[in-house]
Amino acid sequence: MAWTLSLLYLFVLGVCVLETNAQPWLCPTAGNCAQSLGEEFNETLAQIDDSYVIEFCLKKKDFQTSCLNEAVVDCEWAGDEEEYYRLRSVQRNTQGKCSELCPVMEDLQLCPSHVNNVLFFEKKFHQFCNSYKESLDCKTTALSGGSQCSFGEKLFSRGFDDDTIRVFEYICESGCADIDTAWDVLERCTTTHNLNLAGSQCKTYQDLELCLSTSQTCPQIHMMARYFARNYTDYVMKCPLPMPVMKTTTSSEQETEELDPVLTDDTPMPELTDDTTFSKLEGNSKPNQDPIEETKEMVTKELSTATVKGKIFF
């Protein structure tokens, strides 16, 4: 409701500005400049979509460097003409509309600069993620004041490209305590067992899961794999996890002997106990929980939580 009222107020304000400047312009270039800016803003508000408003308010800074300068040249102004000041007034009024929609807009635009991209290329991922947390603190501070900005979160995200946002969501926000080690493991495992290659099967996914599970790193590494393998989620949902195959030996005790895990798509599901090989490899199984399903449950739970939060997976 507040957003709708704000849009209505600014739409009326925009119409008033146009009416105020309805008198003819002596210089056609200046008139076209003022009219196009006002019409574009009113058309933007009519969309009732903050993405359009953000785009307009980000472009409004170009008005001074392009539209105004073009008018100065074409109209042969010296800078003290009445129409020059009139056009500058239109410019300020338009900028003021954006400021009313989001008073902390300029503060928010500074927050992405806290992220140190050099650290990422130097493979100092833990430090890189710390700089991302600093940018989040900056955003929180900007939005925690009395000023309202309905598109603050979206404006903040506009400061990063899609791949960087994927790093934030899948790596920095994973909860992994040793991101640098986990990244090395993920690079090695996803390169050896590459789900991004055409024709990859469940066997490749199973090999990848086993590679990740045998690594000495954080349990969140399975969720982090989504950054390296974009279709990882599809394999999680359709493929069985790797499992140990049991063989009964002929002996006086008729004891059961464990073999190395065999990764096949049609291997029958054995009845597992806490002593099975995969449980040892994972090392994080909960009491009375099937260790084979634990990783899939962890990934599925994370996917469900992220979906609720509106995160991007592809």
Image (spheres, grey):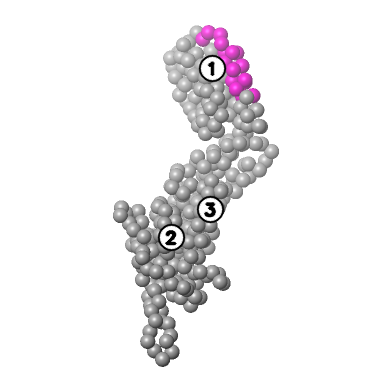
First in sequence: mark 1 vs mark 3:
1
Task: Give the foreground label among 2 and 1.
Answer: 2
Q: Secondary structure at mark 2?
A: helix
Question: Label 3: which residue?
Answer: 304
Question: Label 1: which residue?
Answer: 87
Disc 1 and disc 3 in contact, CB within 8 angstroms: no
Task: Give the foreground label among 1 and 3.
Answer: 3
CA separation in Å, label 1 and label 3: 52 Å
Specify whether 211 is left or right of 4.
left
> Which residues make up the magenta segment?
9-25
Q: Secondary structure at mark 3?
A: helix
Where is residue 114? Give x, y as percent.
53, 47
Question: Label 2: which residue?
Answer: 183
| Residue 218 or residue 260, whichever sits in front | 260
The residue positioned farthest toward the left in the image shown: 199
16 drawn magenta: yes
Q: Secondary structure at mark 1?
A: helix
